[in-house]
Image (cartoon, rainbow, N blue to C red):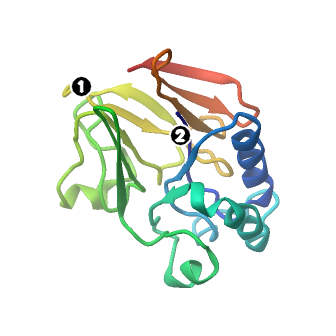
Amino acid sequence: MKYLICSDIHGSETACKKVVDFFNKNECEKLLILGDILYHGPRNPLPEGHNPKGVIELLNPLANKIIACRGNCDAEVDQMVLKFSVLADFFQLFYNNISIFGTHGHVYAPLLADGNIPTGCETAGKRPLVNTPGIVFYGHTHVSILEKNGEGTIVCNPGSVSLPKGGTEAGFALLELGSEKNTLSLCSMDGNILKTISL
């Protein structure tokens, strides 16, 4: 089973096309989107290739393969044009005994290896922190990270595909689960692996 995990598209048709092309070429089964799909937000510049309608046209044909959650820039009007659910604050999947929890990061946030919540996720600190066994994915900060925290939970932010921050590269994550391979990798937009953790 291959899951491609991305976040913070922010209406970039250019970035979304690269994600969809990689998804199709590598025969991934599910595309997990961690929010902020169409709107660029008032604090961000317009990303390269900003075209929300183009993003809609790329993603809607994959609706039955997409699992998504709501970002702080997503709204009910986005749900009106997207054919997959985008308004839940989180999703949780299970593959064999592995829990896969996905959220944007502004409502719920994980504990990092240093015992803190991610910088930029302060509003989530007022709610219960996510520290489920398995893997916790979050977005929101546009800063990619892949590590194991003190509780043994693997924490991953794939970064932003369109507006990376904190000196990190634009990219996404690839989760491969099966009898021969159980890995989670951060990838650049051209698919090069930047970092991998074995599960």
User: What residue is rendered at 58% in x and 60% in y?
Assistant: 64
Q: Give, as a three-letter code, the residue at label 1.
A: Gly
199 on left or right of 17: left
Task: Please tell me which of labels 1 and 2 falls first in the chain.
Answer: 1
User: What residue is rendered at 71% in x and 69% in y?
Assistant: 56
199 on left or right of 117: right
Using the image, determine if residue 84 lies above or below residue 34.
below
Disc 1 from disc 2: Cα separation: 19 Å
Q: Quadrant of residue 168?
A: top right
Q: Give, as a three-letter code, the residue at label 2.
A: Pro
Q: Which residue is mark 1?
A: 152
118 on left or right of 177: left
Disc assigned to residue 158:
2
Disc assigned to residue 194:
none
Residue 54 horizontal/vertical position (percent): 79, 68
Look at the numbered disc 2 and give the secondary structure of its residue: loop
Residue 17 horizontal/vertical position (percent): 78, 52
State the residue in front, 191 or 194.
Answer: 191
State the residue in front, 151 or 87.
Answer: 87
Q: Quadrant of the C terminus?
A: top left
Q: How many marks?
A: 2
State the residue in front, 149 or 54.
Answer: 54
Q: Mark 1 near mark 2, Cβ–Cβ under 8 Å?
A: no
Using the image, determine if residue 80 lies above or below residue 82.
below
87 on left or right of 121: right
Mark 1 crowd level (few <14, some 14–19, many ≥20, 10 Å Cα): some
User: What residue is rendered at 28% in x and 58% in y?
Assistant: 124
Residue 59 horizontal/vertical position (percent): 69, 62
Look at the numbered disc 1 and give the secondary structure of its residue: loop
Mark 2 crowd level (few <14, some 14–19, many ≥20, 10 Å Cα): many
